[in-house]
């Protein structure tokens, strides 16, 4: 080996290769009104939100009325129809919509099954 090989270390084989951050490559432009733009850093416009409003707890043990009606519907199908009416007619919290939607799907399935049973019951020859 010659002395030239000692001058240059072997190339790095790590992944990913080391690259300087984009802000250190070139200085950010300066604006006369005092603001500096740093490339690579997004800036959210609008009013800053310092304290998030705490959401109120859902009724019915924190589950929501929709899911409670859905569970009660297995014992008596009426709550599924009530949940469907609430979903269609009342403005509700977005966190309760999945429960009311489950009620409406269960009510639709129950109605279809009841129609099928009623339609086939009269077709038997006695």
Image: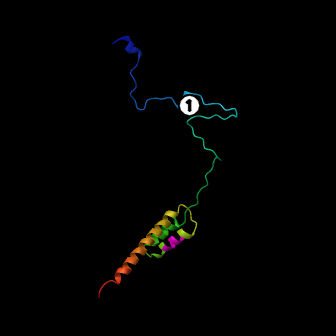
Res. 57 image quadrant:
bottom right
Q: Can you name the residue that lies furthest to the right here?
A: 33
**Residue 56 is a magenta residue:** no
Q: Is residue 85 above or below residue 93?
A: below
> What residue do we see at 38% from left, 81% from top?
118
Q: Nearer the viewer, residue 113 or 13?
A: 113
Q: Is residue 3 above or below residue 75?
A: above
> What residue do we see at 41% from left, 17% from top?
8
**Residue 84 is a magenta residue:** yes
Disc 1 is placed on an element classified as: helix
Quadrant (top left/top right/bottom left/bottom right) for the C terminus: bottom left
Q: Is residue 9 left or right of residue 82?
A: left
Q: Position of residue 119 (x, y in %)?
A: 37, 80
Identify the magenta region.
81-86
Q: Can you name the residue that lies furthest to the left here?
A: 126
Q: Number of callouts in the render?
A: 1
> What residue do we see at 56% from left, 31% from top?
23
Q: What residue does disc 1 label?
A: 23
Say few, some or many: other residues with alpha carbon within 10 Å of mark 1 (under 14 / 14 to 19 / 20 or more): few
């Amino acid at each position: 080996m010659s002395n030239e090989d000692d001058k240059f270390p072997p190339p790095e084989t790590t992944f990913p290769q080391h690259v300087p951050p984009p802000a250190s490559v070139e200085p950010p432009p300066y604006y006369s009104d005092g603001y500096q733009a740093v490339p690579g850093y997004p800036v959210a416009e609008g009013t800053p939100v310092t304290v998030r409003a705490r959401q109120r707890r859902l009724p019915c043990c924190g589950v929501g009325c929709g899911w409670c009606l859905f569970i009660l519907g297995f014992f008596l199908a009426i709550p599924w129809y009530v949940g469907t009416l609430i979903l269609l007619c009342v403005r509700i919290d977005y966190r309760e919509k999945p429960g009311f939607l489950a009620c409406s799907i269960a009510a639709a399935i129950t109605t279809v099954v009841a129609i099928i049973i009623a339609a086939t019951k009269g077709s038997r020859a006695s």
